[in-house]
């Protein structure tokens, strides 16, 4: 991720206090709690025609499902296009024709990540045996999020699978920074409407033999004043963080991702693997966060057309379950010692260090007034430890892990 | 602390790989471990005359005791004044006449914090019953540090009392930032030699009824090319972080500090109390870190003369044991439940959040190449926890604490 663009591209579910819009009455945020998968109820609006996606996207009707605002630099005003906001137009389009392969990418990405969130949560619930808690929230001016979190599970200490959709306006300063990577942006305008949607996930298993995994895929788009698309890009990645290294797990994880990448472009995997090693780097420790995976950003028309890149993103996200389920199933019930549990806690501490010290999205999110902190910090483990001057024994499995974190390995050369 | 100056003023013990100097052979870092309070042995140098401080300052002979470099903006070159570095001059002065009330403030502050470190550690060992581990390190070009840490004690989960002394050179960019608060600095020079010395302490007790306490006092000085003093200032503070609030503890802590302040200037306590509430603020949570104390920076000649300010700093540091010992002795053996221990772990998580997200010195230190990370992160608790959407019960003691963290109280009005 380029330093300048990073903050804008990380999707973080930040709940803002609802603000009054010119088109809709002020509504409170609603939440549905554990065990309930119902979406918030609002004043009844005309029933939309039922397309193939209708059941999943019904919440976008009227208010569009919602609202998280990513950054303080982004204004909180509803965006206006010819008198109607982008959110309203999208809402109308869904009401009129549902979501099809001809719908704008915004709606297709949104539908895709919602579908994936459901599928991933369903499969993880099968692994764990316990249910995820569901928190859904909305904002009147468009956008929203669904956080699904499983805590104190049988297999997972803490697991979060979140989606969020944001409609907002980029101020001039943000546009100037983004132009570095997206020349199509007009430097002369004072603001641009934008849309962002993404799925973020972090799973921390209880068993120290089972690795933590992180994943995030996102789509970003800006719109000209006349409502036409100005620029778009995709970003994201996934990485694996073991406490005890099983080479076969790292190989399987990387191989599954590489296969997903290779289908689209043979150059992607090596390029995005290196990007991942460079980004998830606890520089102050001289250690990578884990054994890596892939990471990329700013995949726009200078790279490939939108359909191809969306297909690539879909391939990556669909590769998640096959990349991780075999690993968690193999490790979740392995025996472990108190010593191994303590080492896991120390590694958890390093995870916290990366997320709070180096991760640009987290830092930016936390410094944003009225952020939904609980969704941002869902990524932190249930517990972590810091022991002064702790060093693994020479020749131990703990030392082997640290050696690999210091010198990333090419798992599928 | 002013935003621009903050990073330069926070003393953090960062160990750099020893670098070759023009005046001394390259020496490895030496460490003395747990139970041993001996200072590192170096090649024997001429015995210094024994002044009242001689035994404590003998390590400054030759190499001066140690080396920590605070920030990446500070160059790692030994500073040169008329052919001899400030460190060498100080070393020579100590050899010739020991440290007296006529010695430069550098040497007096250094001797004072060393003496205080010993006294505080001695008293804390009495409270805990276990000994602190001692890590001492040096750098050939002057400066050094002594970290004393007690982990897994009877009373303290983790307790660190560190001192560090730094000789270095400020580059132009740093000088320009510092000039905002210190007009005496010449904006025309390309570099200035500087000296910094301080004592930093964080104590995390095991018992959730016993509060965490933090303290840091530091002295900073820059020198002109001809070796004369250019500018100087003191900074520091102390704050208390309970998990369960006992009003009498907060009152006692604040009252002891206020008394120390009032002896020097009646305006200090209210001013520095507010500064503390403003600085130790987990903005993203809308909560202060704890019940406060005092915090200040840039106390220079525009405020009071050097002797008066040193006396004030001495008063504050000497007030530490009376401010905290009665509290820890009263709380360390109180009964507590598993629920209360868990709440402590959640509050520890907030402490980690402040230190890693908001504390400027920590962030700057961790982003400095080759920093002594273990000394910087000594401030983190042995363990911490993050529970999704955890909220205290209404009317509970936990809620009472959070209410006070949201609206700081005037404990000794």
Image (cartoon, coloured by chain):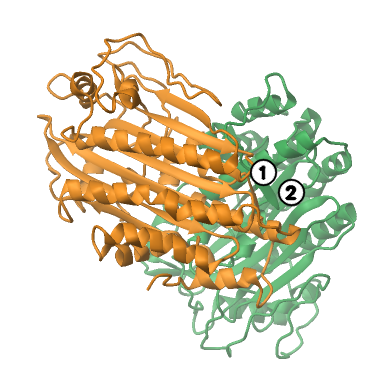
Chain colours: A orange, B green
How many residues crowd around disc 1 within 10 Å: few (fewer than 14), some, or many (20 or more)?
many
Nearest to N terminus: mark 2 or mark 1: 2
Tell which subunit mark 1 falls on: B
Q: Is residue B52 above or below residue B273?
A: below
- Percent position (x, y) of residue A304? 17, 54
- Asked if one can make out residue A171 in the rendered structure from this viewpoint, the answer is yes
Q: Are marks 2 and 1 in contact (CB under 8 Å)?
A: yes
Give the label, 2 or 1, closer to the camera. Answer: 1
- Quarter occupied by residue B271: top right
What is the distance, in whole Å, between disc 2 and disc 1 at their CAs? 9 Å
How many residues crowd around disc 2 within 10 Å: few (fewer than 14), some, or many (20 or more)?
many
Q: Which one is nearer the viewer's eye here, B286 or A105?
A: A105
- Please tell me whether mark 1 sits on a helix, a strand or a loop: helix
**Where the C terminus of chain A falls, by quadrant?**
bottom left
- Percent position (x, y) of residue B189? 37, 68
- Asked if one can make out residue A286 in the rendered structure from this viewpoint, the answer is no
Q: Is residue B355 left or right of residue A230?
A: right
Q: Is residue A173 left or right of residue A399?
A: left
Q: Are marks 2 and 1 on the same chain?
A: yes
Q: Which mark is residue B204?
A: 2
**Residue pointed to by mark 1:** B348
Q: Is residue A106 above or below residue B100?
A: above
Q: Is residue B276 above or below residue B101?
A: above
Q: Which one is nearer the viewer's eye here, A185 or A412?
A: A412
- Percent position (x, y) of residue A369? 43, 32
Q: Is residue B400 left or right of residue A317?
A: right
- Please tell me whether mark 2 sits on a helix, a strand or a loop: strand
- Percent position (x, y) of residue B387? 61, 37
Q: Which one is nearer the viewer's eye here, B82 or A171?
A: A171
**Where the N terminus of chain A falls, by quadrant?**
bottom left
């Amino acid at each position: 991720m380029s330093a300048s663009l990073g903050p804008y591209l990380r999707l973080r579910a930040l709940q803002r206090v609802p603000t009054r819009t010119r088109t809709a009455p002020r509504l409170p945020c609603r939440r549905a709690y554990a065990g309930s998968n119902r979406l918030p109820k609002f004043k009844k609006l005309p029933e939309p025609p039922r397309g193939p996606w209708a059941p999943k996207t019904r919440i976008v009707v009227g208010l569009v499902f919602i609202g998280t605002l990513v950054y303080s630099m982004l204004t909180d005003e509803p965006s206006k296009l010819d008198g109607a906001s982008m959110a309203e137009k999208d809402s109308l389009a869904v009401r009129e024709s549902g979501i099809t392969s001809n719908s704008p990418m915004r709606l297709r990405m949104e539908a895709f990540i919602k579908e994936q969130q459901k599928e991933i949560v369903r499969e993880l619930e099968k692994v764990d045996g316990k249910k995820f808690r569901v928190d859904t929230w909305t904002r009147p001016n468009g956008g929203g999020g669904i956080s699904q979190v499983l805590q104190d599970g049988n297999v997972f200490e803490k697991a979060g699978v979140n989606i969020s959709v944001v409609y907002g306006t980029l101020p001039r300063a943000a546009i100037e920074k983004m132009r570095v990577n997206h020349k199509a942006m007009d430097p002369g305008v004072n603001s641009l409407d934008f849309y962002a949607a993404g799925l973020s996930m972090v799973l921390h298993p209880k068993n120290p033999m089972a690795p933590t995994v992180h994943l995030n895929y996102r789509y970003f788009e800006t719109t000209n004043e006349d409502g036409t698309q100005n620029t778009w890009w995709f970003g994201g990645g996934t990485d694996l963080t073991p406490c005890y290294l099983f080479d076969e797990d790292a190989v399987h994880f990387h191989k599954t991702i590489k296969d997903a990448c290779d289908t689209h472009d043979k150059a992607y995997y090596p390029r995005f693997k290196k990007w991942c090693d460079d980004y998830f780097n606890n520089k102050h420790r001289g250690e990578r966060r884990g054994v890596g995976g892939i990471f990329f950003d700013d995949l726009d028309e200078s790279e490939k057309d939108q359909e191809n890149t969306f297909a690539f993103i879909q391939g990556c996200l669909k590769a998640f379950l096959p990349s991780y389920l075999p690993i968690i199933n193999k490790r979740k019930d392995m025996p472990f010692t108190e010593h191994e549990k303590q080492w896991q806690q120390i590694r958890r501490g390093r995870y916290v260090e990366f997320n709070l010290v180096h991760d640009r999205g987290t830092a930016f999110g936390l410094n944003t007034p009225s952020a939904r902190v609980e969704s941002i910090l869902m990524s932190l483990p249930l517990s972590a430890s810091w022991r002064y001057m702790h060093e693994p024994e020479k020749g131990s499995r703990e030392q082997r892990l640290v050696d690999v974190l210091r010198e990333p390995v090419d798992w599928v050369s």
